[in-house]
């Protein structure tokens, strides 16, 4: 099966500019996640969707970050305006279901590396 | 909130020797624990998980992990390391969301370097 697709792979912007990342999950996966991975740290969940609804966005800096999954498939994560501390790899992941035991395996994309100058 | 700790930033081992990457957890209730691996410029890949049952869990690429409730540990192991095992390894735990559902919370990662 095709994996989780993300684009762009790399992006360099100036602070206060905007950027958008796109994710296409594995076909049939209802749950989609955006994680932020800062160098030297583990991935941190930003937002989690179940189909086109938001399950959790408690760690999303809503003053500058936004995300949508309008048709329950593709998703876009936007940052506007970007800050230096937003430099990180943004990982998209998907899984079959949200609920149940929580034993679902996440499949990750290769990530989008953002550098803010 | 549930959490995991990876006490070692880096582990070095010679090819052919056994390797261990350490993880300890802090949870309320029964832990659901995972190991993922990340190769350079790649996303995280699932290795194995512990939900219940046998304390020794076998996973991909010859890796296994031992769940130890008394020591609250879930160490990743491999009997004979390969140079190609060199990568960044993350331990993760199921964490419950306030509004229901669950998510994965990751440790800080351990860089494994296998040398000839």
Image: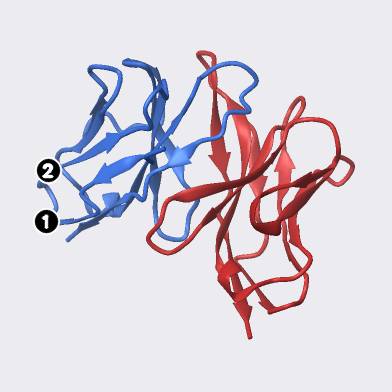
Chain colours: A blue, B red
Chain of residue at mark 2: A
Q: Looking at this rendering, what residue extends furthest in the bottom direction?
A: B116
Task: Pick whichever, B23 or B19, lies toward us.
Answer: B19
Helix, strand or loop status at disc 2: loop
Q: Position of residue B45 (x, y in %)?
A: 52, 49
Q: Looking at this rendering, what residue extends furthest in the right direction?
A: B70
Is residue B24 shown to the viewer in this render?
yes
Q: Looking at this rendering, what residue extends furthest in the front direction?
A: A1
Numbered badge on residue A54:
none
Label 2, label 1: how many angstroms apart (C-alpha)?
9 Å
Up/down of B38 relative to B87, above or below? above
- The residue shown at (41%, 59%) is A39
- The residue shown at (63%, 86%) is B116
In which quarter of the view is residue B81 placed?
A: bottom right
Q: Residues within 10 Å of mark 2 (few under 14, many from 20)?
A: some
| Horizontal arrangement in the rendering, residue B44 relative to residue A85 (left or right) | right
Up/down of B63 relative to A55, above or below? below
- The residue shown at (14%, 52%) is A15
Q: Position of residue B22 (x, y in %)?
A: 72, 58
Q: Position of residue A55 (x, y in %)?
A: 42, 18
Q: Which residue is mark 1?
A: A14
Q: Which residue is mark 2?
A: A18
Chain of residue at mark 1: A
Q: Residues within 10 Å of mark 1 (few under 14, many from 20)?
A: few
């Amino acid at each position: 099966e095709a994996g989780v697709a993300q684009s762009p792979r790399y992006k360099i912007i100036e602070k206060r500019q905007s950027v958008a990342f796109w994710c296409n999950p594995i076909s049939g996966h209802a749950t989609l996640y955006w994680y932020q991975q800062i160098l030297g740290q583990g991935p941190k969940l930003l937002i989690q969707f179940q189909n086109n609804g938001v399950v959790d966005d408690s760690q999303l800096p809503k003053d500058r970050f936004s995300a949508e999954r309008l048709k329950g498939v593709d998703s876009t994560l936007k940052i506007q305006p970007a800050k230096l501390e937003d430099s990180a790899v943004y990982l998209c992941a998907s899984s079959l279901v949200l609920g149940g035991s929580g034993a679902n395996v996440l499949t990750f994309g290769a990530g989008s590396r953002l550098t803010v100058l | 909130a549930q959490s995991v700790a990876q006490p070692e930033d880096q582990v070095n081992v010679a090819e052919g020797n056994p390797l261990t990457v350490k993880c300890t957890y802090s949870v309320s209730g029964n832990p659901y624990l995972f190991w993922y691996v990340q190769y350079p410029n790649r996303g995280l890949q699932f290795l194995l998980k512990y939900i219940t049952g046998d304390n020794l869990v076998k996973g991909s690429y010859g890796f296994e992990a031992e769940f130890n409730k008394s020591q609250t540990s879930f160490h990743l192991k491999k009997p004979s390391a390969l140079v190609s095992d060199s990568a960044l390894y993350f331990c993760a735990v199921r964490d419950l969301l306030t509004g229901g559902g669950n998510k994965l919370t990751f440790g800080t990662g351990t860089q494994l370097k296998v040398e000839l």
